[in-house]
Amino acid sequence: MEIDPTPLAMRDNYKLMTGLIVPRPIAWVSTLSENGQVNLAPFSAFTFVSHKPPMLAISIGRRGTELKDTGNNILRTGEFVVNIGNLALLEPLHLSSAHYPSDESEVEALGLETAPSSLVAPPRLADAPASLECRLNFSRPFGDEENYLMVGEVLRFHIKDHLVNAGKVETRDLDPVARLGGPKYATLGEIVIMPPALVVERVE
């Protein structure tokens, strides 16, 4: 099957992209609204773009013609926290993707606890296995819909003590969840460990 995306509606391209680019890590982003309410929403167009300084990128779409609350809050304040959800938090993570009024806090509605951040105003989720405090470094709209790509510099890592061993994160204990197409999520399943890939020099 060969598909030309040009004549397709946004929704049709969205279904193909989210069905093929899987699994996707989830940035569970906390921000502050204009009236100080804690906004919380998950985004699965999420990756890292730099190690020194550590920087990550999130693509934030629109609801209708308006940029989602998370995007507006980041553009206004320049601050956000990326919380990493795990299987134990999957239900509230999923429910936080629903449309809440701008003046209503998803954190309060879902009964989640927060903890103060060290360097940014938005709080982090107390029960998240890890949280990354971020300052906005770059933002730009892309595509006809003007989804916003937002790049944040990580100012602080908050990681539960038992998850770090010799400077590395114990992925199995992190127990992260990933997004698939539609309302589907994946867990780690089997972890396949391969030997290091070695560069073989050709002898002329």
Image (cartoon, helix red, strand yellow):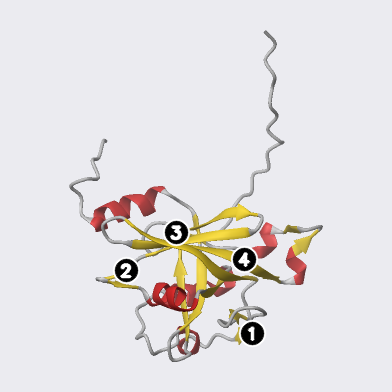
The furthest residue to the right: 166
Instruction: Tell me if label 1 and label 4 are in contact, CB under 8 Å.
Output: no
Pointer 2 residue: 62
Of callouts 1 and 2, the N-terminal one: 2
**Toward the viewer: 66 or 113?**
66
User: Which residue type carries mark 4?
Assistant: Val
User: Which residue type carries mark 3?
Assistant: Ala
- Image quadrant holding the N terminus, namely top left
In the rendered image, residue 88, in percent from the top left (x then y), is placed at 58, 73
Of callouts 3 and 2, the N-terminal one: 3
Query: Which circle, 1 or 4, is nearer the viewer?
Result: 4
User: Which residue type carries mark 1?
Assistant: Pro
Query: Which circle, 4 or 2, is nearer the viewer?
Result: 4
* Badge number at residue 116: 1
In the rendered image, residue 132, in percent from the top left (x then y), is placed at 62, 69
Q: Is 80 rendered above or below residue 189?
A: below
Q: Is 34 rendered above or below residue 188?
A: below
Of callouts 1 and 3, the N-terminal one: 3
Pointer 3 residue: 45
Residues at marks 3 and 2, CA–CA distance in whole angstroms? 13 Å
Residues at marks 3 and 4, CA–CA distance in whole angstroms? 17 Å
The answer to whether one can see residue 84 in this image is no
The residue that appears at 67% across and 70% down in the rendered structure is 156
